[in-house]
Image: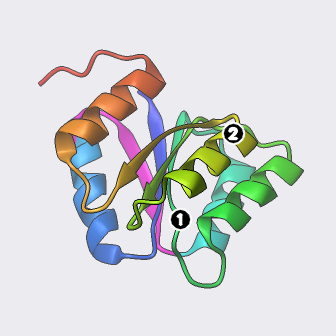
Amino acid sequence: MKTVLLVDDSLTIVKMLSHFLSSLGLAVDFTTEPKEGFEKIKKRSYDLLILDLEMPDMNGVQFLNQMKQSSINIPTMVLTGKKDDRLIFGIMSQFSHVKKYEIKPYNKDNIEKSVKDILKIEIKF
């Protein structure tokens, strides 16, 4: 079973996405605390990281920089509330493990397609 770590400071989004991803047959681990999320990826191997860019204490770019400094290379999808093409392009070109992005409010069909593309799996209901 493929494993996903979801890091987003919004408990509502974490609960909704976690439930949705679980319904797709994925094992989901999550946290609303970026620092805790980073500790999790240091201790365990995940197939996919879904990461919010706008979080207090440690934003998504800082999180990605720490991953890079620690040589942690987990395929990643970023979530953002801002449609900023320059920011997204910069992130995707600076961090090769960032494969997809989704703008909030997210669309479940887009999330499913992105997860499927990244994990190279066929999701069946």
User: Residue at 30% across / 54% down in the picture?
Assistant: 18
Q: Which image quadrant is residue 61 in?
A: bottom right
Please count the marks in the image.
2
Image coordinates of residue 84 in percent, x first then y, are 48, 59
Is 18 on the left-hand or right-hand side of 120? left
Mark 2: which amino acid?
Ser
Q: In which quarter of the image is the C terminus?
A: top left
Secondary element at tag 2: helix
Is 68 on the left-hand or right-hand side of 14? right
Image coordinates of residue 59 in percent, x first then y, are 62, 72
Secondary element at tag 1: loop
Dot 2 alpha-carbon crowd within 10 angstroms: few under 14, some 14 to 19, many 20 or more: few
Image coordinates of residue 81 in percent, x first then y, are 38, 67
Q: In this view, does 16 lie above or below 101?
A: below
Magenta span includes 63: no
User: Residue at 47% across / 73% down in the picture?
Assistant: 32
Dot 1 alpha-carbon crowd within 10 angstroms: few under 14, some 14 to 19, many 20 or more: many
Image coordinates of residue 43 in percent, x first then y, are 72, 51
Mark 1: which amino acid?
Leu
In front: 10, or 2? 10
Instruction: Identify residue for label 2.
Output: 93
Q: In this view, does 106 lie above or below 115?
A: below
In front: 110, or 49? 110
Task: Please give the range of residues in magenta.
Answer: 23-32
Instruction: Identify residue for label 1.
Output: 53
